[in-house]
Each structure stands twice: as structure tokens, then as C-alpha cells.
Image (cartoon, rainbow, N blue to C red):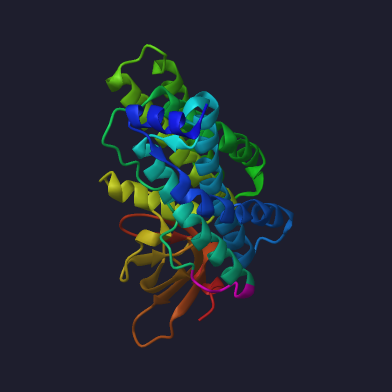
Amino acid sequence: MSRVAVWLRSLLRGEVSTAEIEARRRAGMAAYSLAEEAEAAGGDDRGSCVFRLCAWNAFALQTIAETMLDADSADDPATAGYVPPSTLRFVGDCLDEVPDWIRRARIVEGDPDVRVAAGLPARLPRWRYDEPTTEIELHGLRRAYEALEPRVESGVQTAAAAPAGAAGELRRVRAEMVSAADYAEAIRSRNAGPIDRGEARWRLLDALEHAYLLGQLLALPTLVEVARVRDKREDELPLETERSWLQIEPGCPVLDSEGVRVGAVQRVRGDRETGAFEGLDVDPGIASAFVRVPARAVAAIGAAEIRLSVRRDDLDG
């Protein structure tokens, strides 16, 4: 089919050319070699983990964009090189973020303690649309999900070494991912109307979002705390009896393993960007020196008090 015929056919369908994003698509392919480098690199220190997270984000965004474009061309070769405007906007937004994550990965590689300067865990770009979702778009989203799912699935299965509580959160995020994908597949059909296609699109995007999140949590398990607290705040859920260290406020009472008051929290030490908890500085009062409590000595964080797993005499001043 001639280029003019392809253009006319795409014009009738309201599709737009992908020519404007081809250069970014080719440049972003560096994300694949970066992902291979990250998989081969060892280490569980902050720098190594953040490096793997940045590499995963670049890989996932590039994979989603390329998979959706390739699926559109394969499903409708008569308009190859043209896609619905909503697809182009979403794919373009994904490609725009790829070089930023590659750059962050290289910066962290050189300086393991540097801040990423991005809200973690990161989210996928928002899907913007002005027209009904097409079946081809749904297939592209499904293919993108299927490209990411095996990688995070295998990661969850081998996450036994994750910090306490992290493994359970990883399984929960995986369950959310699979549930959204399965529901989208159940309602998606060739005869689905625009409302059903819109619902399927929303569910597939939710599945992709959870896969993207899961890859980040697997790369940096301490980020589980940040994700958990953020979700509860956004959902406006009531505070739990057992809270995160990110929710500790100065002045909170601290009791040792025998229920004896150690003092009140003066400072919370940790990396709020990555969720890594280091410990507490506790003020015992009466002009006494601050007591340093390591993270491993914190047994429970409640809404009204913090309980330790050691006696006061076992702590350093």
C-alpha cells in the first residue's frame, strides 16, 4: 500500500503519525543495555539498589512504549506508522521519561548517596484521551503488561530475603496487578462497546501501574514503607494501630521491653526518599544525654507509643 493510501486511511480513522517520537524511541533503546547491566551488578547497599530501580524504570517505560507501537503496527499494518492520538500521547510521555531515569542511574552509579530528585516510587504517565478506546489500544496495553509481568513475577517468587513485612507487601501488590489484568481480560471482547472498552483500558493501566511499582519495590525493598504510607494517605484510610517509622512524630513516648519509659522521640533518623529506617534519638529528659535507638531495637510503632525489643540499660547514650 502506498504512503498516500496509508495516510488517507489513517486520516479517516483519526490517527496521527508516530514520526515525531521515532528519534526518542531509538535513543531510549539504551535502557535495555542499562537493564542488563543492572541485573548483572550485585550489592544490596543503597547505591546499588537505587541504580537497579532507575534502570528498571527506564526499561519499563521504554518497553511499554515500544510494545504498544509494535502491537498497533502488527494489528493494523494498513496504517503502520499511525496510531490513535491517545496512544501517541501516552507513548510519548513514557519515552520522555526514559532519558531522565538513565541519567539518574548514571549519577547514582558515580555517587551512591545522591538523592534521586524524583518522587519514589515513581508512577506511570497519565493516560489522556479525547476519543473512545479502540480494541487495538487494548491489545497494545495487554501486550505491554505481558512484557513486564514475567520479570516482576519471578522477582516476587525469589523475594524471601526482603525485609520483614516487605515480602507480604510485594505479594499484595502482585495480587492487585494480576486481579486488574484478569478483570480487564474478562470484560474485553471484539464486540465490547465504548464503555466496556474504557473500563478494560482503566484496568489494564492499573495492572501496568502495579507492575511498574512492583519492579521498583523489588529493586529497593525499603521503598515498601514509602509506598504503603503514601497509599494510605491518598486513600484517606484511618491510621493503623501498627504504624510506619515514616509516621513517627517528635515527642512520641518510647518504652523499653519491660514497659519502662525511655523518653520521648527527639529525632527520627532514616532516608525518607528510599524508606530506609536507621533509628531514633530519644530525649530521656532531666538534662540527660540523648539515647540512640537503632532501628533493629524498635519492636513496634503504635499510634500512642513506641515499644523496644531491648531494656533501657542495653541502649547507648
Position of 25 relative to 140 (above/below):
below
Position of 239 relative to 117 (above/below):
above
- Disc tally is 0
Magenta span includes 96: no
Task: List x then y, in percent, for residue 203.
Answer: 39, 30
Which residue is located at x 36 percent, y 63 percent? 248
Which residue is located at x 56 percent, y 61 percent? 102
Of residues 273 and 26, which is closer to you in this image? 26
Of residues 219 and 31, which is closer to you in this image? 31
Of residues 45 and 181, which is closer to you in this image? 181
Magenta range is 110-115
Task: List x then y, in percent, for residue 241.
Answer: 34, 48
Task: List x then y, in percent, for residue 93.
Answer: 41, 50
Res. 163 in view: no
Position of 172 relative to 261 (above/below):
above
Task: List x then y, in percent, for residue 186.
Answer: 43, 16
Left or right, 109 with respect to 124, comes to: right
Q: Residue furthest top?
A: 191
The dominant secondary structure in magenta is loop
Which residue is located at x 49 percent, y 31 percent? 72
